Amino acid sequence: MPDQSENFTQVSASRPKKGVGAVLRGLQFKWTLLLTVFMFVLAIAGDTLIGRSTERLISRQQSVGALQQCGMLAAAAAPKLRNSDRVGLDQAARNLIADTSILYVEYYSSSGKLLLQRRRGSATPPPLGAESSSAPVVSRANRTFWYPPTEHMPLFVDVVQAATLPLSGRDALPDGAEPVVGYVRVGLDLSDIQTSLSSFLQKVRYVGICSILLIIPLAFMIVRRVAAPINELGIVVTQFAGGNYRIRSEIRRSDEIGQLATAFNSMADELAVSNNRMVKLNAELEDRVLQRTRQLKDLSERDPLTGLYNRRHLNEVLSRRFSEAERYGNDLSCRMIDLDNFKKVNDQFGHEMGDNLLILTGSVISSQMRGADVGARFGGDEFCILLPQTSAEQARGVGERIVEKFAEELQKRIPGQAAGFGISVGVAGMKELNLVGHDELIKGADQALYEAKDAGKNCIHLAQTLA
């Protein structure tokens, strides 16, 4: 497993491609949409508030102006109303109708009786209302009434103003006479004002729309300033959780997001160091377990005294080798080796010498085996060797070298006392005996071993038939 260094490199987060659904679910899109909707609502509310406030302000100003204008007309018409000068009133009314802002003019006596009416075109004055204890025009004096535009009338204001004489004129009146000499009613056309107001509100709306269009990218940039680092930090955390322990956030800010990125980098450093240590410990543990497993396997398969395989392992290998030889048409031979007069060695030289003799036998056998051969301690002082792709005659030749090698080594160990000690070897071949089972191969070699013992020991014998 590759060793990961604890000196980590700053790795940028690779931004994954996002689909439309992921973008729509993203924080940046949601915040931008929310801020845009908020600005739209704010603009609509502002437009409505500005429109209503402007209309109210203009209404107050126009009402005051209409009262003042009508008051001046009433003051000018007062002498004529006192003298009931209809000709003068008619001339004044004609002059007023010539003004495009006046739709109609009506003059009333002090009792509220209509004296004269002039109107422009199809302009129709609205009714004054039902008769009451006082004339309707009297009840509407010094007041303004607004009327919306209709098919025949534009937006206008209806004003009634009482006409009074100056103090000098009042002093000349008889005792008990009313100071009001009549009433003047006019209708003022406000369509120009409405047009100006609509144009003003339209400009306000245009300004609001342009502001919103400018605010949308500004809002996007503001949201991106907040959402983009969070999104990038999320990508970094996701890749770190996926196993990329070298990745770090590159966010460098002094606000809470920057503090969060710094805290994540510190945490990632600690986790990465801990992970590397765990990886190393795990690798060491795996190596130890593997070594221990091999040791245990060797202990379970090998003879602790000679280092050769044990009988159980030999039986497992024999079964596989025999099947392979049958499948591919190869030969397979087996040598059974037994120490001659081994009991005498133990009795004469002791069990320690007997163990050394067994070790010597295992060493000699191992020195004469090829890489594919399998040698095992069969039991007690018996040994067995499997020789794949080897005929019985070939195995016999190698067996003779083992007998000679053992005699040389034995003479070195117990010089002058090696007479009478040696090894007997029995050899059996799979093809020579036409064997059909791996047990028969061991049986044939064992049978040849006993024949070697009967022939005088310290020799090698080849099995000819299987009894």
Image (spheres, rainbow, N blue to C red):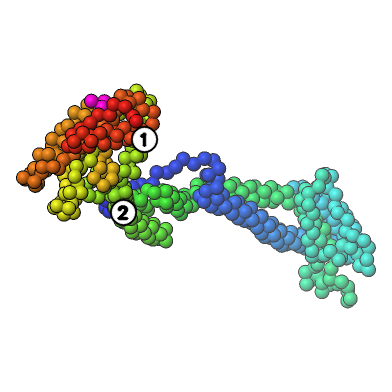
Please say if 212 is above or below 52: above
Helix, strand or loop status at disc 2 = helix
Task: Residue lying at the far top in this picture: please name it.
Answer: 329
Q: Residue at x 36, y 47 (%)?
A: 12
Question: To which quarter of the image does residue 392 belong?
Answer: top left
Amino acid under label 2? Answer: Leu
Task: Residue lying at the far bottom in this picture: please name it.
Answer: 175
User: In this orientation, does residue 320 appear?
Assistant: no
Range covered by the magenta-colored residues: 389-393
Pick the front one: 310 or 268: 310
Amino acid under label 1? Answer: Asp
Pick the front one: 328 or 155: 328
Identify the residue position indicated by label 2 in the image.
Answer: 285
Please say if 295 is above or below 370: below
Whether residue 452 appears in magenta in the rendering, the answer is no
Position of residue 270 measured from the top left corner of the image (x, y, whole percent): 33, 59
Horizontally, residue 442 falls left or right of residue 158, namely left
Q: Residues within 10 Å of mark 1 (few under 14, many from 20)?
A: few
Residue 439: mark: 1
